[in-house]
Image (cartoon, rainbow, N blue to C red):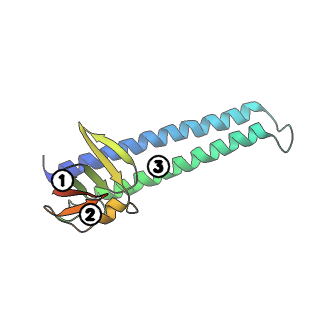
Amino acid sequence: MTREEQRQQVICSCIQQQEHIANIAKQEMDSAQQQSNDYGANVDRYDSYRTKMMRSRDMYARQYSNALAGIRALQDLLKMPPFDTVEHGACVVTDRQKFFLSIGAGKFMVGKDVYFAISAQTPIYQAVKGHKVGDVFVINGQSQTIKEIF
């Protein structure tokens, strides 16, 4: 498998995870709205149950919106070529872990491999940014050697 194919596979797996998150958030948002609608008309201005349902709906709406924004950002990364240095959009394989420098999406699977999608705000992103294959970086007192970048 070429570097480009590997990278595409990682990005597509991350997109699938984000789509799953978006679908769950949408279902929960719709469910909260339906529960509020089924409850009927406002009993009074301080109706705590309806308020709870609306807060729940709003929380899931934010999660849904964030997941969609993440999907759009990942789709933009599909258009970029593989990388030789560590930068936003690169997949980094070290002697300890595999990272996808993109959005903060956490752990996801690509086949049998575990990757971590990390955002630019994380300390590990800052520690690896600009490095090349063979470089060593230290995070949390542990050194890691970059084996592959794509």
Looking at the image, residue 148 lies above or below residue 39: below
Q: Residues within 10 Å of mark 2 (few under 14, many from 20)?
A: many
Residue under label 3, please give it.
67
Residue under label 1, please give it.
4
| Occupied quadrant, residue 40 | top right
Q: CA distance from mark 3 to mark 1?
A: 25 Å
Q: Is residue 150 visible?
A: no
| Residue occupying the point 32% across, 59% down | 124
Tell me where residue 129 appears, x and y as whole percent.
Answer: 27, 66
Q: Residue furthest bottom?
A: 130
Tell me where residue 79 appears, x and y as whole percent.
Answer: 28, 58
Tell me where residue 18 appears, x and y as whole percent.
Answer: 41, 45
| Residue occupying the point 22% across, 58% down | 143
Q: Nearer the viewer, residue 39 or 48?
A: 48
Between label 1 and label 2, give the one nearer the viewer.
2
Q: Amino acid at mark 3?
A: Ala
Q: Nearer the viewer, residue 91 or 76?
A: 91
